[in-house]
Each structure stands twice: as structure tokens, then as C-alpha cells.
Amino acid sequence: MTGLLGAALPAVPLVAGLIGLLLPPSPRGATTGEDRARRVAIGLGVAGAAGALLIALVLLARVGDPVETSTTWIDLGGLRVTLGVRLDGTAALVAVAVTAVALAVQVYSTAYLKRGPHDDVEVDHRYPPYAAQISLFTAAMLLVVVAGDLVMLLVGWEVMGLCSYLLIAHDRRLPEAPAAAMKAFLVTRVGDVGFLLGIALLGVSAGSFRIADVLAHDHATGTLTAACLLLLAGVAGKSAQFPLHTWLPDAMAGPTPISALIHAATMVAAGVYAVARLYPLFEATPTALAVLGVMASITLLLGALAATAQDDLKRVLAWSTVSQIGYMTGALAVGAPAAALFHLLTHAAFKALLFLAAGAVIHAVGSTLMSRMGGLRRDMPVTFWCTLIGLGALAGVPPLSGFWSKDGVLAVAEAAALDGTGPAPAWVGWLVWLAGLLGVVVTAWYATRLLLRTFLGEPRMPLLRPHDPPAAMRWPVLLLAVPAALLGLVGFVQPFADRLLVPTVPTLAPGEALLVHVGPALLLPTALLLLGAGLAWAGWHRDPAADPARALGPLRPVFARAFRLDDVQHALVVRPARALARLARTGDEVGVDGLVEGSGRGASGLGGGLAALHRAALPRAAAAVLAGALLIGVATVLIGGLP
């Protein structure tokens, strides 16, 4: 029964998505009451997500020890590809997070994707494919979660990339949306090439792509190192880690609910989950963990510093996602997959909350720029308090969820640095720990700035009359505020703690896996949090009308452009690729086409010339024949001599 439920978990939203793709687009100009296709699409999307959530909750209650079912699908000369699921407590927890956020996004989208604030206004005529694509996106992530075979995992991995392309480009009226979708698709494809090659190496080495077989096989050291490094390329692409992080901020051109889905529960979480799923392989490869630690530390600080100088509300949250994923990969690098997964779960709750709350603000104000906001606390109290909870969890304010998970990451990094615990070299622990501590200061600073610029002070557009969102948008935000606030406390619950892979702090017993040391280990992160928040508040208090980011001085444009790494990527990759494409096109048009077309033109010209000769008048033709005969005779005499 557990195996059947595991197979049904991605199948339910998959069926809902496939049926939804058969629905016709809504008629242009139709209102909500007239749009039957929209109503059916809403029913399918919500039912698919709700059904998957119900199955995930049942699995969470049932699954204790790992459960695996598989059957051979293809046997290529002894290299087996299997169909089956691999379930444990970790998979069930991640599945609950994915389906809960997907359900919230489906419900939220019913109100967000309208042309106006009233029930009888013209609707988005492309809503049916939008809802279906969300269902397919959810099914793909769930397939990654439960897959018992690397090839099945790869299928879900790639379908997510395709769905992200379609959903980011949903609003065709925005010129930046198709470009952002194409950029996300191409950048993640670069990493996916490495991911595919890594899977191929592991499968060939083990003689099977079944995850249990791959983990149990004794791989050669060189093969394992190469495979893990190749897998990290895919992780860097999907989870927006340096240097393949540049697509994620641009993906904010998509609808805000899609931003919540990508950032909170799918896509960026997939890379972290994949490494945790295959962690025994990485644990045996210190080189790969060292690379992961460097990548995580750079990404953590890069995302946090870039978030300090953004004026676009969604881009602040996007860069914060880049930074927070850096905490997760940092925990993996120092040997604590449980700490990474716990932060993944809390991040799913508070980041979905923040994006949906941001969508409520954008829906009310009609702009994503914080410079056009301010003073929204009075008119949008529900959104304000929910955002306050989300930002507090993001910054790690106790006792909110982010406090427990982020300080858990810092605790294991500290242990790896000071005590040398973990499979990676000790310097990796120092790098992750110091980057994480600096990230606490910067995160608290930009979270406080976002709250002050958006909700406090005087309105910068006083003619607006903002309001809290309608019920379909308000209730998902309110419900997500509960886990964002309280999810960290369930670490004290034995069954929850036992469902993660290993203890967050290696010295603790399994039942205490999600707890961190209450004492000196928490004092430094808390002091740094207060320092960052205090600096932002002090700058705003001196001049509430000014942006605290002005204190960054000449660094502000550098941070706003994320150290111009996008420009570097454009100069080193995009422009040479385009120049090569132009050269290939010119060679094809001038060389290949020119040769083919030139031979045709030459044959046609020769034929035309011969035709002209055949059309000569009789006297001229007779003279030509006689002249030819004379020339032949002269040539014969000169060559052969006289008889």
C-alpha cells in the first residue's frame, strides 16, 4: 500500500495537468462568471494539489523505515533502468512541503490572475494552461522526491525545467518575460548536461540506475569524484548557485505565485534534495564537498549583498533565495544533510509566505518598486503582520522557524570548523561558518529595510487606496504564516526529528536531531542579527524618506548589479556564442548555400550561353563551322606534321 501511495503521489497532479492541457483557452473578453474553462481548470488544479497533499500526509504518518518498490523497465545488456519509488521520512516531509505550497499557489492564483480586483472583471484568457502547467510542475518535483531510479529522477528534473520556462513566460504582454524564460531554460540546461553525465557515470559504474544499487556499489575513486562534480553542475543550475545563479532574479518577470512555487518548494529545492538523496556518495568524496562548500559560501554572500541594493520587491526576495540556498548547500558541504533539509522545509514555508504577501502588495499598489510604496501598514494590516513573520523567519528571529534551522546550519558549521567534524576538510567548515555569520548580519539588514520601505513611514503614492487582498489570496497567506512561525518548534517532537537523515548536530541523540545548543552557540548569531537590523533601522530613522541603501555609497551600484557577474557571463559566454552562431550562419549561407546555388547558377549560365550559340543566324553559323574546321586542320598540321 505504501508503494502504491508513493506512485500515486506524482500521478495525481500529473493526471490533473494532462487533462487541464486539453482545455481550450478562455474566450477573450470573458468575465469570471462566463468562463467555464477557467472554472474547470481551477477545479482540476486545486483538486490535484489537494489530493497530492492528502497522500503526502498519509505517507508521513505511515512511513517509518525506508520503503522501496521497483520493477525492471529496460535492460540494456545488463544496465538496468527501473520503475519504482524510494520512500522514507525525509521524502514524506519534503512531499508535504511541496504539495502544501502548490495548493496555496493554486488557490492564490484564482484571485491573482485576474485583470482587476472585482469578481466580474475580464479574466486572464490563458489561465487553463497556466493551472495545468502548475500541476505538471508539482508532479515533476514529486517525481524527483519519490524516484527510486536515477533515470526517473532525471525525467522529473527535466520536466521541471520545461514547466519553469512555460510559467515564467506566462504573461506575454511583458517583453522581459520571454527573455527571462529563455535565460532560465538555457542556463539550467548548461548545468543539466553535467547532471546527465554524472548520472550516466554512476549508472555504468554500478550496472544499474536504481538508487539503492548506486549507493551500495563500490565505485572507483576517480569515477565517483568525477560523477559527483558533474552532479554539482546540475545542482548549481537548478538551485541557482554560483556561477549558474544569474537566471533566478530575472525569473521574477513571471507571475508572483510562480515565483513562490519556484523559490519555495520546487526547482531551487530540487538540487539540495538531490544531493541529500545521494549524500553517501558525496560523503565519500571530500573534493566534491570542498567544491560545494566554496560554491555555497560565495553564493550565500553574493545573494545577500545583492539583495541589499534592490528596489524591486520581488528581486530582493529572489536574491534572498539565492543566499538561503547557500546556507543549505553549506550544511551539506560540512556533513549535515539533516540541517540542510530542515532549513529547506522552513525556507519553503517562510519564502512562500513572503512571495504571496508580496503579491498582495503588488496587487494593491500596482508596482513592484519599493520606492513607490511606504505606509502600507495602516491599510494592509493582515499583509503587514504576515510579512513581518516571514521576514523574521528569514532573518532568524527567535523563536520563528528560520531561527532554529539557520542556527542549526551555523552550529554544524562551527563544529566542523572548531572540532574538525564532518567529511570535508576543516577549512570548508571555517569558510561556511564565517560566511554564514556575515550572512546573518546582511540578511537582517535587508529584511529590515524591506519592511521599513514597504510598510512604514509615509506613503510615497498618497493617491492610492491599497487594501488587504481578497479571501482567495488572503487565506493562503494566513495559513502559510503558521508554519513560518512555528515549524521550527516541531523539532522538539520526536517523530518529526526521527524522519530526517542524520542529527543536525552530530553529538546529539537522534531524538534531538533538530535542536541546537541553547547557550553560547546562539549568542553570536543573535547579536549579529540585532546588529544588522539595528543598522538598517538607524539609517531609516534618521531620514524615513530616504533609502537606507544609500549608506552603501559607491558599493550600491555594484551590489545592485550583483557584482556585474551577469555582464561577465554575457561577455564570456553569450557574446562569443552569438558570434560563433553568426559565423556558422555566414559559413552556411556563403559557403554551403553559395556552392550549391553557385553551381546551379553556373550550369544555368552555361546552358544559356550554349542556347545562344544554337540560335545563331545561318551565315554566321556556317562561318563558325568553317573557321572551326580551319583551326582543326591547322592544329593537326602543327602537331602531326605534313604527310
Image (cartoon, rainbow, N blue to C red):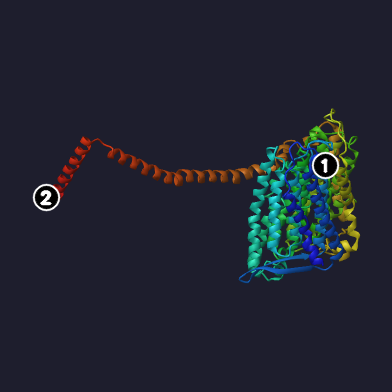
- The image position of residue 370, as x and y in percent, is 80, 36
Of residues 383 and 13, which is closer to you in this image?
Answer: 13
In the picture, the quarter occupied by the N terminus is bottom right
Q: How crowded is mark 2: few (under 14 residues within 10 Å), some or many (20 or more)?
A: few
Q: Which residue is drawn at 63% across and 72% down?
A: 78
Q: Quadrant of residue 195?
A: bottom right
- Identify the residue position indicated by label 2 in the image: 641
User: Where residue 143 is drawn, which disc sits there?
Assistant: none
Front label number (1 vs 2): 1
Where 615 sits versus 144, above or below?
Answer: above
Q: Is mark 1 on a helix, strand or loop?
A: helix
- The image position of residue 351, as x and y in percent, is 81, 48
Q: In which quarter of the image is residue 332?
A: bottom right
Q: Which residue is drawn at 65% across and 54% down?
A: 191
Q: How crowded is mark 1: few (under 14 residues within 10 Å), some or many (20 or more)?
A: many
Where 450 sits versus 23, above or below?
Answer: above
Where 541 sits versus 294, above or below?
Answer: above
Say whether residue 512 is left or right of residue 28: right
Q: Which residue is drawn at 51% across and 44% down?
A: 585
As shown in the figure, which amino acid type bears the numbered disc 2? Answer: Gly
- The image position of residue 557, as x and y in percent, is 71, 37
Q: Distance between the residues labelled 1 and 2?
A: 104 Å
Question: If you read the primary sequence from the N terminus, does the residue marked by circle 1 or circle 2 appear first?
Answer: 1
As shown in the figure, which amino acid type bears the numbered disc 1? Answer: Ala
- The image position of residue 148, as x and y in percent, is 73, 65
Where 43 sits versus 450, above or below?
Answer: below
- Identify the residue position indicated by label 1 in the image: 111
